[in-house]
Image (cartoon, helix red, strand yellow):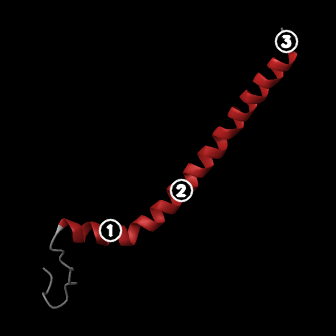
Amino acid sequence: MLNPSSAPRVKRSNSLRDISRDYFDAEANREFTTEAAVFGTLILMAIVPIMAGISAVVQLLRSLPLF
């Protein structure tokens, strides 16, 4: 058993708002940075095939005879 004087004190939150505020103060910045980096990487990876598709359509349209 823990001696009451040696046990660490736990800060009690009175409401869900306090609990969520504590969480977002500590964790949200790190998670946001990681998620923003992953999102940016996915966007850049998606741009390459889109641009290749647009280029292929433009080349196709250039090769067709105009009426």
Disc 2/disc 1 C-alpha distance (Å):
19 Å
Residue positioned 23% across, 71% down in the render: 18
Q: Nearer the viewer, mark 1 or mark 3?
A: 3
Q: Residues within 10 Å of mark 1 (few under 14, many from 20)?
A: few
Which of the pair 52/30 is nearer the observer?
52
Q: Which mark is drawn over residue 36?
A: 2
Q: Give the total of numbered labels.
A: 3
As drawn, 27 above or below 58: below
Residue positioned 45% across, 61% down in the render: 31
Report helix, strand or loop for mark 3.
loop
Residue with the mark numbered 3? 66
Q: Where residue 7 sits: x, y (%)? A: 19, 84
Q: Where residue 65 sits: x, y (%)? A: 87, 10
Q: Amino acid at mark 3?
A: Leu
Which of the pair 4/31 is nearer the observer?
31
Q: Residues within 10 Å of mark 3 (few under 14, many from 20)?
A: few
Which residue extends farthest front? 67
User: Where is residue 37, by image quadrant?
Assistant: bottom right
Q: Where residue 40 sits: x, y (%)? A: 60, 51
Report helix, strand or loop for mark 1.
helix
Q: Amino acid at mark 2?
A: Ala
Q: Nearer the viewer, mark 3 or mark 2?
A: 3
Q: Amino acid at mark 1?
A: Tyr
Residue with the mark numbered 1? 23
As drawn, 11 above or below 64: below
User: Where is residue 28, by image quadrant?
Assistant: bottom left
Q: Are marks 3 and 2 in contact (CB under 8 Å)?
A: no
Which residue extends farthest bottom? 5
